């Protein structure tokens, strides 16, 4: 079988599997977030933290709950790293430096999982398992909870309540993320992914000498990092390491887990608003953008543009031979279209235009299908902007799902869209203005791309990187930490405020002039608005970086 045929089968089989599970898995997710019954464990946890499970919250209380939970999580994880030398299973590692502990705490609580350090030589087992891996679960659950709260805003009328954050958090973690990550870990272990708690594993074939590499719970961490669209990894080279991703089919499974929940959440949206066709329309927008990105990334990498790739016949630098070009490009596209950030190849070694695609994927706002929860609420905000633009063109008050998009709603949606571009562009400019761009391995257009990629990844809570840049400095850890923090929680507060505004409205009956939002015309409009907004915002920066390098 040729590499091209294998690559096509890889992508097609992924698409078939996701389509097949979209409805049944989406219905399961719907049953979890809409159910009224609580399990014994859930009741025990909620009683322990003093939560009235029957009480609902306004958008402001819901937002304060999200922020309070996240703030406590950051403080706990920071202390965990600073005190790790006193903890069990520390493996003798020293405490993480203050600026690094801040960056890592913020990174994992915001579902970014940006790693400025090699995990296997910096963190002990307890910090990895009870600190970082726990945030892999709960930070992903926060994203799903916020998305569900926004959908409730569309579904409810004359109500200021969006549900209960603590109930949503516990249910999503226990009923969705934990069970599927256990199943995923078992399958990955069957595929050869390592799962152990040994103090060290003697590795000679990989290192050429008798180097001792710390062992650890790789399989379970790998499953939840992919399922919760988290980046990060036990090993510094992430999913390129044969302990984390040994074969082509484990590679397929990891990409599948990355996409499963985000592509199923539109079904939850359709069910909650009582119009499944609306969910299909949102899923179609995600699928179109995702397919275009995967195709272009494979094409640019397979073409091998550049002197060295053309000389050797392929752009294989930085890629694992067992995955080849097409599977590596598909993985790169999937993990930057979502907020995963995991990598099985070096994005910094991609061709200029091939490396531009992961960057553009993040600049889209990671909405195709995006992170768990974050992708859905990001896409719904873009749908609101699209409806507003369409209303301006025909001179009608814009409506979406019977809710009027007035001045307050469009201001909140616009601010949501502007947060991450502001962080990306201001952060990149600050790095060059202060001389911190010197940590980039390259100069010229590629050096700009490395810096731009770092701030784009942090601000969009992705976690991947152009590895040529060194960020283990106080300035970079502080700056990227601030971008991750603001890029996560400012949009969440704006989304919840939008949800509260929508929930208080009385639905407007559809009329002959109402724009149908479940038809191909609207799907095409949302795709167009998404691409145009990103092009207007980031084209100058892209022209100076990857486009200049590629041309």
Image (tube, rainbow, N blue to C red):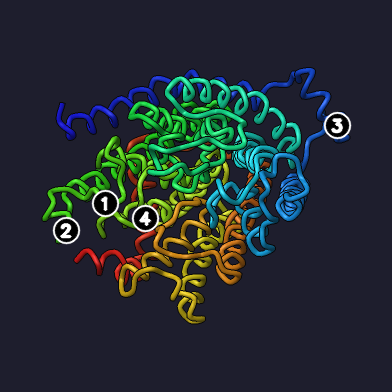
Disc 2 to disc 3, how far (Cα)? 63 Å
The image quarter containing residue 507 is top right
Disc 2 to disc 4, how far (Cα)? 24 Å
* Left or right for 153, reference 201: right
Percent position of residue 49, x then y? 85, 35
Residue bearing mark 2: 308
Mark 2 and mark 4 lie on one chain; the one further toward the N terminus is 2
Residue bearing mark 1: 317
Residue bearing mark 4: 360
Disc 2 to disc 1, how far (Cα)? 9 Å
Judging from the image, what secondary structure is the residue with disc 4 in? helix
Q: Are marks 2 and 3 in contact (CB under 8 Å)?
A: no
Mark 2 or 3, closer to the camera: 2
User: What is the number of the mark on residue 259?
Assistant: none
Q: Relative to 113, does residue 183 appear above or below in the rendering? A: above
Q: Are marks 2 and 4 in contact (CB under 8 Å)?
A: no
402 or 409: nearer the viewer: 409
């Amino acid at each position: 079988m040729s590499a091209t045929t294998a690559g096509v089968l890889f992508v097609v089989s992924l698409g078939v599997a996701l389509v097949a599970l979209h409805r049944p898995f989406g219905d399961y997710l719907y049953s979890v977030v809409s159910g009224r019954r609580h399990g014994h464990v859930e009741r025990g946890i909620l009683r322990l933290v003093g939560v009235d499970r029957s009480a609902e919250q306004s958008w402001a209380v819901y937002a304060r709950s999200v922020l309070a939970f996240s703030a406590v999580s950051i403080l706990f994880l920071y202390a965990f790293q600073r005190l790790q030398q006193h903890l069990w299973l520390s493996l003798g590692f020293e405490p993480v430096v203050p600026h690094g502990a801040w960056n890592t705490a913020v990174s994992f609580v915001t579902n970014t999982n940006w790693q400025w350090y090699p995990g296997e030589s910096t963190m002990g087992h307890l910090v990895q398992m009870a600190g970082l891996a726990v945030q892999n679960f709960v930070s992903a659950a926060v994203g799903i909870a916020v998305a569900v709260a926004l959908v409730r805003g569309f579904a409810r009328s004359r109500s200021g309540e969006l549900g209960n954050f603590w109930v949503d958090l516990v249910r999503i973690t226990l009923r969705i993320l934990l069970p599927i990550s256990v199943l995923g870990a078992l399958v990955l272990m069957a595929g050869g992914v390592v799962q152990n708690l040994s103090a060290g594993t003697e590795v000679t074939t990989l290192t050429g000498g008798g180097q001792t590499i710390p062992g650890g719970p790789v399989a379970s961490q790998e499953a939840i990092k992919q399922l919760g669209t988290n980046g990060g990894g036990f090993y510094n080279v992430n999913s390129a390491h044969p302990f984390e991703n040994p074969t082509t089919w484990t590679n397929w499974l990891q990409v599948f887990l990355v996409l499963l929940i985000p592509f199923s959440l539109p079904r939850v949206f359709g069910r909650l608003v009582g119009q499944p066709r609306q969910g299909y329309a949102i899923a179609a927008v995600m699928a179109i953008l995702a397919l275009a990105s995967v195709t272009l990334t494979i094409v640019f990498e397979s073409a091998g543009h550049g002197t060295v790739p053309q000389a050797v016949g392929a752009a294989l630098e930085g890629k694992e031979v067992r995955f080849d070009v097409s599977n590596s490009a598909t993985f790169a596209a999937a993990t930057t279209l979502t907020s995963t950030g995991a990598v099985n190849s070096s994005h910094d070694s991609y061709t200029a235009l091939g490396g531009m695609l992961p960057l553009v994927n993040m600049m889209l706002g990671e909405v195709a299908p995006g992170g768990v929860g974050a992708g859905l609420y990001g896409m719904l905000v873009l749908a609101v902007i699209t409806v507003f633009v369409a209303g301006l063109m025909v001179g009608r008050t814009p409506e979406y799902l019977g809710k009027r998009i007035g001045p307050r709603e469009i201001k909140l949606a616009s601010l949501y869209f502007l947060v991450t571009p502001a962080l990306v562009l201001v952060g990149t400019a600050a790095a060059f203005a202060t001389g911190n761009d010197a940590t980039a391995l390259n100069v010229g257009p590629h050096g700009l791309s490395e810096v731009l990629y770092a701030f784009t990844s942090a601000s969009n809570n992705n976690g991947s990187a152009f590895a040529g840049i060194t960020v283990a400095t106080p300035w970079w850890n502080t700056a990227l930490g601030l971008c991750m923090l603001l890029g996560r929680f400012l949009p969440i507060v704006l989304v919840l405020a939008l949800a509260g505004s929508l929930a208080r409205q009385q639905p407007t009956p559809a009329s002959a002039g109402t724009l149908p939002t479940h038809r191909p015309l609207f799907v095409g409009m949302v795709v167009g608005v998404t691409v145009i907004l990103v092009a207007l915002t980031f084209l100058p920066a892209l022209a100076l970086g990857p486009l200049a390098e590629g041309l």
